[in-house]
Image: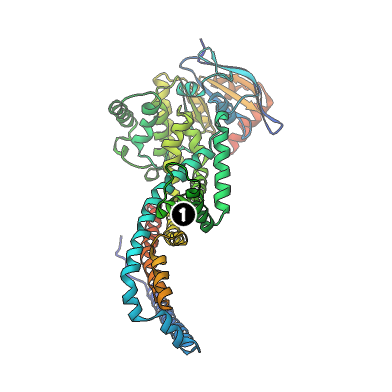
């Protein structure tokens, strides 16, 4: 069974349709990338899955349960998802350790000692063992984003949503964050990510989706999308990315 | 790498800067002295000065009034110390009530809005009158008759409304992305408030809160209007028997002595926040 299924999802903002009937299925351990120009609906799609936005039509299923039903327990759905934002959104008044253990302790009822032990394990695994007691503003952008990924990971989500996680980082910091995501893929995590890093996208994705004006125009394995795109719009987009030196 | 030797150009720059700094300092000193001399001269040369000096700056009266006014001032401090935590609690609860979106709690939300509208609109001195004279007049069981207690209730009601608005602005100043991050982790609305929004909001509103408390410290004198023997009331009693206003000056000095440390403490906290941000 698919981890996530979207059926004809529509989302409107102020009379303008940002998502126009999206159909998408994400299988266990699959990494799906969403590419497309700014405003093509990539981030909105992730926010709809996370229920930060309410869809205007269609349905989204998580492990077969419809999560777009208004009667659904929103917090219960979010418990099963991990999301990482472009701007990290760490809690500035908490240490790295408290940022990571907040959800396990308060949402999943994990005892403090165990939550902290697991957090230390994750920090060590991703090269941040020294930073447990640091506050977010004492960390570099790359370190903050790694902490944000660990924070999402600490609740052992069924599906990770990564929204432009490297867009706010200096080029030399992008690599350390991409390294983590690569490791997550190897550990079998199911992920949907939006990105402008085409080289990385090609490298890590099982499936690449090209969104254009809220429509999922083209979908396929990276070799196909990057080498022989069917649509003229996809070719145009990839050419513009290539010319701007982001490939 | 060779050692750094200060260049002639840099040395010249530093000479110019030092000369400028000396010049600024001497101008500031001279203008301050001139200003003070001028103010003292204008006041002491005014036709009414001998009379004012006699009525407001009488050393004998000062010594005589000081013990009573000081004693009354202890009541001001007591009122302030009891009212302050109550105000914080009322303010926070009202601010939270105004943010409730659950339909069943709509009456609470409406009541909280009404409360802030009413008590921010009515002058504090009127609230003190209404509570001080109105509440006991109801002759209900359990209504306190102690004047200081009634004063504390009135101040709490009046300042609670202001403090609620300070808390609310603090809550609203927290960026929505923080709420989005917390809710995404599965935290409920209440837990998001408790662990993510409120801790950040309270830190932000400490300076404006302390400012309100400086204001509260002197407004404890308004309670004098319903009669308890606090500093202003004691000063009034002395002044009424001698027609000398020096006791008022004594009371004023006591209030200043209390508020200045609070003001410096506020500055200190603000500076600490700035330093932390910079770190």
Q: Is residue A72 above or below residue A15?
A: above
Q: Which image quarter holds the N terminus of chain B?
A: bottom left
Residue B219 screen position, x and y as percent: 45, 60
Snapshot quadrant of residue B228: bottom left
Residue A239 screen position, x and y as percent: 62, 32
Q: Is residue B130 above or below residue A83?
A: below
Name the residue at 42% across, 79% down: B56
Q: Is residue A221 left or right of residue A56?
A: left
Scheme of colours in the image = rainbow
Q: Is residue A36 left or right of residue A190?
A: right
Residue B164 visible here? yes
Q: Describe the element under mark 1 as helix, strand or loop.
A: helix
Name the residue at 65% across, 28% down: A212
- Name, please, the residue furthest toward the right: A15
Name the residue at 45% across, 17% down: A29
Residue A204 screen position, x and y as percent: 47, 24
Residue B112 screen position, x and y as percent: 54, 41
**Mark 1 = which residue?**
B208
- In depth, the one of A73 and B155 nearer the eye is B155
Name the residue at 61% across, 30% down: A36
């Amino acid at each position: 069974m698919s981890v996530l299924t979207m059926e004809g999802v529509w989302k409107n903002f102020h009379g303008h349709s940002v998502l126009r009937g999206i159909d998408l299925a994400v299988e266990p351990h699959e990494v799906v990338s969403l590419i497309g120009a700014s405003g093509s609906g990539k981030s909105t799609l992730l926010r709809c899955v996370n229920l930060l936005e309410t869809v205007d039509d269609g349905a989204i299923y998580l492990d077969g349960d419809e999560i777009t039903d208004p009667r659904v327990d929103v917090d219960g759905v979010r418990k099963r998802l991990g999301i990482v934002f472009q701007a990290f959104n760490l809690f500035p008044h908490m240490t790295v350790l408290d940022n990571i253990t907040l959800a396990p302790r308060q949402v999943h009822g994990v005892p403090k000692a165990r939550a902290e032990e697991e957090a230390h394990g994750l920090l060590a695994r991703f090269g941040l063992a020294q930073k447990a007691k640091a506050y977010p503003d004492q960390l570099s952008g790359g370190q903050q984003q790694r902490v944000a990924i660990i924070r999402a990971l600490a609740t052992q989500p069924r599906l990770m949503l990564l929204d432009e996680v490297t867009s706010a980082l200096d080029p030399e910091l992008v690599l350390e964050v991409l390294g983590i995501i690569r490791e997550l893929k190897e550990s079998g995590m199911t992920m949907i990510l939006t990105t402008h890093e085409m080289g990385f996208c090609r490298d890590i994705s099982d499936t690449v989706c090209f969104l254009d004006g809220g429509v999922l125009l083209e979908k396929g394995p990276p070799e196909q999308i990057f080498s022989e795109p069917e649509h003229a719009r996809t070719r145009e987009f990839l050419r513009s990315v290539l010319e701007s030196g982001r490939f | 790498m060779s050692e750094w030797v200060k260049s002639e150009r840099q040395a010249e720059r530093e000479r110019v800067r030092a000369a400028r700094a000396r010049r600024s300092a001497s101008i500031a000193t001279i203008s301050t002295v001139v200003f003070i001399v001028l103010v003292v001269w204008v006041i002491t040369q005014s036709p009414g000065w001998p009379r004012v000096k006699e009525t407001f700056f009488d050393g004998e009266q000062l010594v005589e009034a000081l013990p009573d006014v000081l004693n009354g001032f202890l009541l001001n401090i007591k009122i302030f110390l009891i009212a302050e935590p109550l105000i914080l609690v009322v303010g926070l609860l009202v601010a939270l009530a105004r943010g409730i979106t659950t339909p069943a709690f709509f009456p609470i939300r409406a009541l909280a809005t009404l409360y802030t509208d009413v008590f921010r609109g009515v002058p504090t001195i009127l609230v003190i009158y209404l509570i001080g004279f109105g509440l006991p007049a109801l002759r209900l069981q359990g209504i306190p008759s102690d004047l200081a207690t009634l004063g504390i209730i009135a101040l709490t009601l009046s300042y609670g409304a202001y403090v609620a608005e300070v808390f609310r602005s603090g809550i609203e100043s927290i960026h929505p992305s923080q709420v989005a991050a917390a809710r995404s982790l599965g935290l409920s609305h209440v837990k998001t408030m408790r662990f993510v929004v409120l801790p950040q909001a309270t830190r932000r509103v400490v300076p404006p809160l302390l400012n309100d408390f400086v204001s509260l410290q002197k407004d404890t004198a308004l309670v004098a209007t319903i009669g308890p023997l606090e500093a202003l009331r004691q000063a009034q009693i002395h002044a009424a028997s001698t027609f000398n206003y020096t006791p008022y000056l004594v009371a004023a000095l006591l209030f200043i002595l209390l508020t200045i440390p609070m003001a410096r403490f506020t500055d200190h906290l603000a500076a600490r926040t700035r330093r932390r941000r910079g770190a």
